[in-house]
């Protein structure tokens, strides 16, 4: 993932309602949720929710599809995984973190002595 895409994604998530909506979409799974259901769950006006979902879509974090008269949003899991990988790729002195272990470096890198 390129730095500019990471910046867009993190910028989109740096807002209370967008972060909450994204977390709900991640929990909802690939089936996603209708925009109206998201707005209702978060007690956000539908017009505001549409704006927030557009921001998440523009950042590449969600996918939208039409289902009858509703627009269904779902988390883009490959994009989410790429973002998380980018954020942790240098964790633990460059050793990849495992799914069952916390990322907690046990030693500090040596400082360059100039």
Image: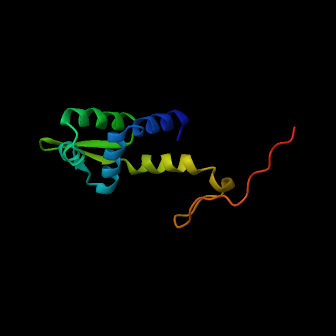
Furthest-bottom residue in this view: 100
x and y, in percent, of residue 42 in the image: 25, 45
Way the structure is coloured: rainbow
- Closer to the camera, 114 or 77? 114
x and y, in percent, of residue 76 in the image: 37, 47
Splitting the image into 4 quarters, where does residue 9 fall? Answer: top left
Determine the residue positioned at 55% across, 46% down.
86
Splitting the image into 4 quarters, where does residue 58 fall? Answer: top left
Question: Horizontal placement of 66 versus 57: left or right?
Answer: left
Furthest-left residue in this view: 69
Is residue 114 visible to us here? yes
x and y, in percent, of residue 66 in the image: 19, 42
Is residue 29 visible to us here? no
Determine the residue positioned at 35% across, 38% down.
56
Determine the residue positioned at 62% across, 53% down.
91
State how many labels appear: 0
- Closer to the camera, 79 or 91? 91
Determine the residue positioned at 46% across, 51% down.
81
102 over 69 or under it: above or below: below
10 over 76 or under it: above or below: above
Please identify the quadrant where the C terminus is shown.
Answer: top right
């Amino acid at each position: 993932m390129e730095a500019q895409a990471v910046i867009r994604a993190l910028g989109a998530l740096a807002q209370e309602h967008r972060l909450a909506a994204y977390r709900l979409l991640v929990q909802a799974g690939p089936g996603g949720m209708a925009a109206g259901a998201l707005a209702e769950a978060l007690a956000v006006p539908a017009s505001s929710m549409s704006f927030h979902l557009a921001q998440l879509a523009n950042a590449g974090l969600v996918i939208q599809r039409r289902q009858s008269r509703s627009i269904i949003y779902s988390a883009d899991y490959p994009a989410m995984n790429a973002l998380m990988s980018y954020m942790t790729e240098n964790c633990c002195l460059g050793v990849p973190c495992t799914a069952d272990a916390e990322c907690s470096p046990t030693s500090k890198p040596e400082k360059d002595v100039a």
